[in-house]
Image: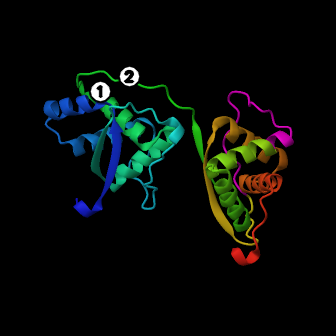
Amino acid sequence: MQWTNLHSTTARLGQDTDDRLTAAVQLTGKGVQDIWEAAINLLADRNGIREKMPAGADLTLPRPIENRTFDGDAVKATVRLTRNTRARLAAVASRLGLGGSEAVVEALNTWFDEQGVPGEHAIPARPPTRHFTKVMIQHATSERLKREAKRLKRSAQSVMEESINRFASRHGVPETMPAGSPVTLPRPGRASTHGGTASATARLTENTRARLVAVCVQQSRTAAEVINEALDAFCDQTGMPRPDDREL
């Protein structure tokens, strides 16, 4: 293992977790880095994350600000993870709807419990499930989204979520979807490339994702087409002008 192939990873550990980590080092004789590696891979295994991640796997850890649950006495800890473990951490955090730090804390305490490391960990209430949603939209729409988010001093994700919900309401989709509603986006049978496209990404709440799927099914359209139109409609309502072709 080459040092240069490791990825610096930082998490905030509550005092109880940090105390258990210290105890684990003494009890097992393992180093902190080895414990993090073992813990993250255990959590990934238990949640169905593939053992060997593909070469292009995303290494970016989710940072859902609304889910942060750290205490004031949280300890900042950093280790250097192998690329595969970092990718598995990113994947399991996304699957569980956790930020990177929350996923590390859950992984460590899961491993501590399995190893019989003394100490208790109060598991916080699991934040609402969010669904990673990535589509390709028109460059012009992408630019309007960026400008509108900046003007409103909101995140692009917040604007996308509100746009989808407004659009769904206008097309008769229930405001609150029944439990168990489908959240799997229909596979695109075609792709629009007129004017070029740009990536738009959001972590949608389960209800918004279900409403998006319902609109797609109702109109026999792809998620990209629905989101593109929903964003343009939102920007039209707020008065955000369409960018000049020379700006794209």
**Residue 105 position (above or below residue 59):** above
Disc 2 is placed on an element classified as loop
Q: What quarter of the picture does the N terminus occupy?
A: bottom left
Q: Are marks 1 and 2 in contact (CB under 8 Å)?
A: yes
Instruction: Report the amino acid beneath label 2.
Output: Ala
Could you tell me which residue is drawn at 23 percent across and 25 percent down?
117
Q: Residue under circle 1?
A: 16
Counting the numbered discs, the total is 2
Residue 170 versus residue 152: which sits nearer the camera? 152
Main SS, magenta residues = loop
Instruction: Report the amino acid beneath label 1.
Output: Asp
Q: What quarter of the picture does the C terminus occupy?
A: bottom right
Q: Is residue 178 magenta?
A: yes
Q: Which residues are magenta?
A: 168-188
Disc 1 is placed on an element classified as helix
Q: Position of residue 235 (x, y in %)?
A: 77, 55
Q: Residue under circle 2?
A: 122
Q: Is residue 74 magenta?
A: no
